[in-house]
Image (tube, rainbow, N blue to C red):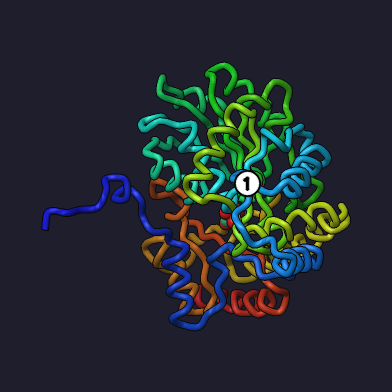
Amino acid sequence: MALRTSNRIEQIVQSEIRAMSIECEKVKGINLAQGVCDTEVPLPVRAGAKNAIDEGINSYTRFDGIDELRIAISKKMKAYNGITADPETEIVVSSGSTGSFYCACLALLNPGDEVILFEPYYGYHVNTLLAAETVPVFVKLQPPQWSFDPKDLEKIISPRTKGILINTPANPSGKVFSRKELEFIADFAVRHDLFVFTDEIYEYFLYDGHKHISPASLPGMAERTITISGVSKTFSITGWRIGYSISDAKWAKMIGYINDLVYVCAPAPLQMGVAKGLLELKMEYYNELCLEYAVKRDKICSSLIKAGLSPYKPQGAYYVLADISNVPGKTSKEKAMFILSKTGVACVPDTAFFHKKIKPGLVRFCYAKKDHELDEACKRLEKLKSFI
Ligand code: PLP
């Protein structure tokens, strides 16, 4: 048989995150590899979805989402992000922020276009760009602050560069981009006439007084910026698949066409649940979320230190990268497997977040876990010290 898969798929590698989750399952370990948050879903969100099913909101919706949800998102964007978005024309609800980014790439980028992204990166960003047959190009973030050298951006620009991707707060580094950094990127994007794609899924997970700034809220940036976010993390509903993009009406229309083509619409009753959550939950809910996650962050960082690893304390999101130089093993994968074998706790090796081998090795732990499970994981991790 001469049949073969597309060239496109050959470039896309299966995530190391999934591979580590499988290894974790084999030993019935605690999975701190995958970014699944299993904290409680807020009541208005759950009740809103259940009532919607009972009230018969079960059909296809408008391709860009139900009115209630687009209006709720528009209000939240204004209040929290400082972005004005017309709910009729500038918001497209999609199948998670993952779906939103995919639709934006298909609508706005051509095969061969280059898109700059910061490394360490979130693997889905790279794979989505590859699936759209575009070319990811990388700018390094340097620990401990995960700062970038502006000169690196200038070095990497080419006539084919069409966009730059920001993820703030970032997975896996926990970096929260500062206003100064975003202003530099904004100026860079204007000078080189680039789209700015910004994934803000962790916008509410902020620690130590760090503030979330949406690039689209900076002067003159709204027109070229595609803001992507969702509620998977904020409401602990990763399986519901509700996310959205905000962009100028001329881009949103095209993103909407692709969204219609690929997903038709996001799940109708779940859109209603999310709309209720956005409208009914007050700022206290989000503030408490930050406090709750800050405790989890401090807990895991302190255990990682006791374990003999060196964590980079995250400023936001809910992952921590740790230096594993002193863990036995030739590669980061071997070291992650060593940690799993000695502690029963799974983490992700750096190969999931870097396009080239890095030194010293890093692994990522996700701390979006219920307290009792995180406590047990921390206790086990601390035992690593006796093996290294
Ligand atoms: N963006 C980032 C940076 C993520 O880390 C994740 C999940 O881990 C997602 C997007 C996925 O979000 P969604 O569930 O809205 O597709």
**In-image side of 112 versus 197 (left or right):** left
**In-image side of 180 versus 16 (left or right):** right
Residue shown at 46%/33% (left/top)?
Answer: 115
Q: What percent of the width, then of the height, locates residue 293? A: 75, 62
Location of residue 189 with respect to 377 vertically, above or below:
above
Q: What percent of the width, then of the height, locates residue 173? A: 59, 50
Q: Nearer the viewer, residue 388 or 198?
A: 198
Location of residue 233 with respect to 302 vertically, above or below:
above
Residue shown at 64%/28% (left/top)?
Answer: 248
Q: Is residue 20 visible?
A: yes
**In-image side of 26 versus 302 (left or right):** left
- For disc 1, the marked residue is 62
Quarter placement of the N terminus? bottom left
Q: What percent of the width, then of the height, locates residue 145? A: 64, 43
Q: Is residue 145 visible?
A: no
The amino acid pointed to by label 1 is Arg
Which residue is most to the left? 1
